Amino acid sequence: MQQPFRNRADAGQRLAAMLHTYADRSDVLVLGLPRGGVPVAYEIAEALNAPLDVFVVRKIGVPGHEELALGAIATGGVRVFNEDVRFALRAPEAVIDELTAREQRELERRERAYRGDRPALSPEGKITILVDDGLATGASMRAAIAALRRQNPSKIVVAVPTAAPPVCDEFRHKVDEIICAITPEPFMAVGLWYQDFSQTSDQEVRDLMERARDGVEV
């Protein structure tokens, strides 16, 4: 039986031990997906002595069918579209631009809330460790990977505490390396594999970002 994590900090510490080969390197960057991925990523960044940043992803939903992703935008001004959906929708460019602008405003609001006036750290040429608190469907992580790849990291490593086994396997073909600490079967939901899976607040993300900035020279 695979043991649940006490909380996100415990999950991050256990993941960090599995990422020890990336410790104390100048070419490593840790990116946490807000909000729940940031406490996990913070522990990894601390253990590896690596800089930490947030990587905000916003889905662009099809009007009236918002659960269907037309595309996504992410930190760094990157837009990624699902071309099959875009072609089938045949929406005018003006509509797509309007939808994108709305999500861009929300993305910028969140980045200001989490990072303040500090500029985003560039993944270009870096071994970039992309962290969330778990993978259920993997939709947000897929969007994050597609967006991150546009920023030319030297290597993309996905690290999550827990994932559905087929989803973890799927990502082996999408990134250079994936580490899923536990892949329970049946999986059911990410939150079942934490004793404490309380919601991460914006304030907690801000506090962790401040602590990371004060602790690591970038």
Image: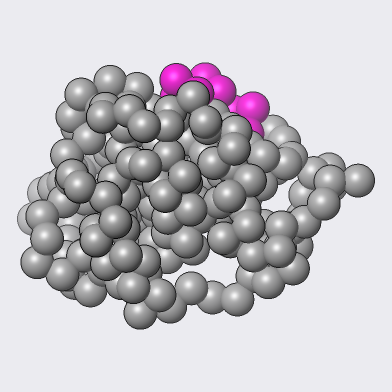
Picture coordinates of residue 206, whole percent (x, y): 31, 72
In the visual, does 199 lie left or right of 50? right
- Of residues 70 and 79, which is closer to you in this image? 79
Residue with the most extreme right position? 1
In the visual, does 183 lie left or right of 49? right
Picture coordinates of residue 60, whole percent (x, y): 30, 56
Q: Quadrant of the C terminus?
A: top left
Residue 85, above or below 117:
above
Q: Is there any visible trace of residue 13 in the rendered image?
A: yes
Q: Is there any visible trace of residue 67 in the rendered image?
A: no
Residue stretch in magenta: 168-177
The residue depicted at 24 percent of the width and 58 percent of the height is 213
In the visual, does 218 lie left or right of 31? left
- Of residues 72 and 174, which is closer to you in this image? 174
Residue 81, above or below 106:
above
Magenta stretch holds residue 184? no
The residue depicted at 47 percent of the width and 61 percent of the height is 39
Picture coordinates of residue 35, whole percent (x, y): 42, 65
Residue 37, above or below 139:
below
In the visual, does 130 lie left or right of 75? right
The total number of labels drawn is 0
The residue depicted at 44 percent of the width and 20 percent of the height is 176
- Of residues 180 and 167, which is closer to you in this image? 180
The residue depicted at 82 percent of the width and 51 percent of the height is 3
- Of residues 171 and 125, which is closer to you in this image? 125
Picture coordinates of residue 161, whole percent (x, y): 62, 47
| Quadrant in the rendering for residue 164 | top right
| Quadrant in the rendering for residue 113 | bottom left
Magenta stretch holds residue 174? yes
| Quadrant in the rendering for residue 110 | bottom left
Q: What colour-coding does the image apply? A: one colour
